[in-house]
Image (spheres, grey):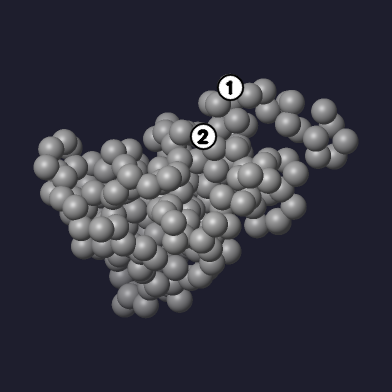
Amino acid sequence: MIRFEVPFKFESNKMEDGPISGSTKPPVHYLTGKLLIAMPAMDDPYFQDSVILILDHDESKAVGVVINKPAGFIQFGKQVGKEKSEVWDNLQIPVYFGGPVDSELAMILHSCDITDYESSQVINEHFCVTSSLHILEDISKGEGPDKRLFSLGYASWAPGQLENELQANVWLVGEGSKDLVFDTDAQDIWSSAIQSIGIDPGLLSTKGGTA
């Protein structure tokens, strides 16, 4: 049974201006809002060829979701324990593997055109994350945020762990863009992310004896 909870919470700073006024504004932290792009040498099967959007990063932790590993579809009426209804029976949304931590935890990464859900957290001007049935109900009615990506599970790092991995050249870092995250086919996200930082993916394709 899936459940809903955002596994982090930003300090309570209110945005005074801009299109997401009134929402909780994150402090500026490290790689929050950036992309981690796995290098070909990545040997962790959970993260091979993965691209991760960092949701929160500070001195005590790093939290992110994988954005390029589709995991099929979920029939939500059965998963969330709702009584049988046509709306919930027909609500099938593509689900992504968000990471190996807490695989029953559901989060919706979405554009910030709607941020008034109780659990919504603003990552930056491009991305928000919400974990609630309310947003699914809106989606089932053809409402809700314009762009969204539904994930189960997430990735997390202990203090200093991500920094060590970056020093070991396990990851490349890129800018998060809505087009890349929401509008690019999952199978093309890794190569598109590499290209977005000015690198030819072919130069990194060392797996399987290719160059």
Which residue reaches farthest right?
209
Q: Could you say where residue 197 lies in the image, as x and y percent from the top left?
A: 55, 26
Q: Is residue 42 left or right of residue 4?
A: right
Identity of the residue drawn at 33% across and 75% down: 82
61 or 21: nearer the eye?
Answer: 61
Q: Is residue 154 above or below residue 186?
A: below
Label 1: how many residues lie within 10 Å, few (<14), some (14-19) or many (20+)?
A: few
Foreground of the two, 134 or 174: 174
Is residue 134 rendered to the left or right of residue 70?
A: left
Q: Amino acid at mark 2?
A: Gly
Q: Is residue 167 visible?
A: yes
Q: Label 2: which residue?
A: 174
Which residue is rendered at x = 19% and y = 52% of the image?
A: 13
Q: Which image quadrant is residue 16 in?
A: top left
Q: Position of residue 37 (x, y in %)?
A: 59, 40
Q: Can you identify the residue that label 1 sits on?
A: 198
Residue 140 in the image: x percent, y percent?
A: 30, 56
**What's under tag 1, amino acid-wise?**
Gly
**Does 57 appear above or below 152?**
above
Name the residue: 34% across, 53% down. 129
Q: Earlier in the sequence, mark 2 or mark 1?
A: 2
* Tag shown at residue 46: none
Side (left or right) of 26 relative to 105: left
Mark 1, secondary structure of its residue: loop
Element at badge 2?
A: strand
In the foreground, 186 or 194: 194
Where 174 falls versus 63 (above or below)? above
